Amino acid sequence: MNVVDWYKDYTDPIPDDLVTALRERKCVALLGSGVTSRCLSKSRAPLPGWAALLRSLVEWADRERIVNRGDVEDLVELIESSKFLIVAQELREQIGDAGFSRFMSETFDPDAIVPSPVHELLSVVPFRGFITTNYDNLLERAYINVKNRQLERLLLESETSFEKVVQREPFLLKLHGDIEVPSSIVLAYRDYLKLVADTRFQTLLDTIFSEFSTLMVGYGLNDLDIIQSLDRTTHAGTCRRHFLLTRKDTRNSVERRRLLRDRNIETIQYIDYFGFHNHVDTFLEALVGALDLASELKRVRPKLRRRIHVHYPLHCVSDGEFAWHYVFREGAITLSERAQLMQLENLKSSLDKGLRALDYIAFVTDEQGLTDATFRPLIERTMELSKSVGVQVVFLIIGSDQRPDRVLPAAAGSPAFYLRTGFGEIDLEAFRAYIAQDMQAGFRQP
């Protein structure tokens, strides 16, 4: 099978015009909040879109007592009515730039969030530049990981011109600001009014849409400034062909036809089976292959294509489920969501069948779990059987730096990774790197 054919079961075909634009260095990636939703915040929830962000901001400001208590119910009601700009303007005035910056740092801890595989894949595709409405630094960090060079941001300032933007190759234009510069953030009603009324900004955006095609990823076409620019350039006859990567069945045939005729935007649909949008990655991988750059995919961290089951004592359910979600998102073959709910029963069944079709078992536990009357015998039985069938047992120990074999002698020789209480994705990176190294060495159950 051709290197780019396998993706067609999951996404629409790659448009020839998109490949041509990339080859000619005439294509820019336009990234929205859907890209960051693949990443998890400090609370282990996906980074929020606009509605969820505002809801979290209201809750935080209420707890911190920096918003009028009498306004909280009204603000929530407005969010439920999708009147986001009104809420954002009110919050911006009540909590200020410094308050918003503190909220982002305390709630999301931006530097501790791990860039997703889609960030790394976007870094591999030879875009002429990137435009993003996101405030985070995830793309910049992924680009360093993949390319070993810095992707410097450009913010909208008085001297920002098209000529200044394209001097950098690739460029990164953060249209709505950066979390490290609170005053640059475009969030509220008046912020958008200022943008759409700024002729310098209009000219910059119009020129970009006239000179470059864009591939829109994780973007919902909801920003007034961008929509108006697309409409102006289409009406003037200068708008290049643009491409919108969108989940299948979210836009019907009439809307897709109107986008093409009215804004010169061609939709590319992908199938989303589990709500993780993994086939955005599939499309980008195929796009790299179509450009004869498949070797560049070696720069992207490999998917954990191993059979990994995650088990934990009942008092560690939230930690265990988080680790299970992590390995699933990273490409592991693991228990289904329904089966994971019965993970201890499934472990017993798997032991009875001789731990077949498994490469790894990861035990997520604290010291209490190692002595638990129900969980400890399962670990001991697993350790005894795993050595004879070639299954690797790995321990993820929460809130302790003590090796598990000091409490459970049967665990001697098994790798252990130590996690802080309330650990996040970044704490699982060492575990992930261990599996990836094993993959390179060829470890797999016989």
Image (tube, grey):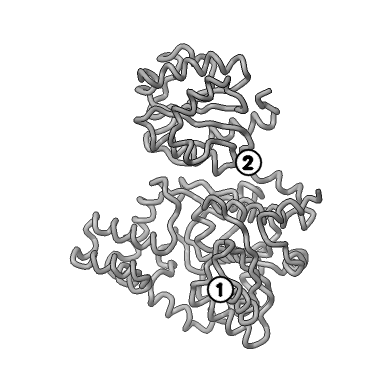
Horizontal and vertical percent for residue 403? 45, 19
Residue at 46 percent across and 11 percent down: it is 409
Query: Mark 2: which secondary structure?
Result: loop
Residue at 63 percent across and 83 percent down: it is 234
Q: Residue 160, which numbered label?
A: 1
- Total labels drawn: 2
Q: Is residue 260 above or below residue 54?
A: below
Q: Is residue 54 above or below residue 105?
A: below
Horizontal and vertical percent for residue 346? 49, 28
Type of amino acid under label 2: Lys
Extreme residue in the top direction: 409
Horizontal and vertical percent for residue 284? 67, 56
> Within 10 Å of the Cα at label 1, are there few (<14), some (14-19), or many (20+) other Cα atoms?
some
The answer to whether residue 141 is left or right of residue 127 is: left
Tell which circle, 2 or 1, labels the residue nearer the N-terminal end: 1
Residue 427 visible, this angle: no
Residue at 54 percent across and 66 percent down: it is 250
- Where, quadrant-wise, is the C terminus in this rendering? top right
Q: Residue 303, which numbered label?
A: 2
Residue 16 visible, this angle: yes
Query: Mark 1: which secondary structure?
Result: loop
> Within 10 Å of the Cα at label 2, are there few (<14), some (14-19), or many (20+) other Cα atoms?
some
| Residue situated in front as seen by the camera: 251 or 220 | 251
Between circles 2 and 1, the one closer to the viewer is: 2
The answer to whether residue 90 is left or right of residue 229 is: left
Q: Quadrant of residue 103?
A: bottom left
**Are the residues flagged by discs 2 and 1 in contact, CB closer than 8 Å?**
no
Horizontal and vertical percent for residue 233? 62, 83
Residue at 35 percent across and 61 percent down: it is 100
| Residue situated in front as seen by the camera: 193 or 316 | 316
Type of amino acid under label 1: Thr
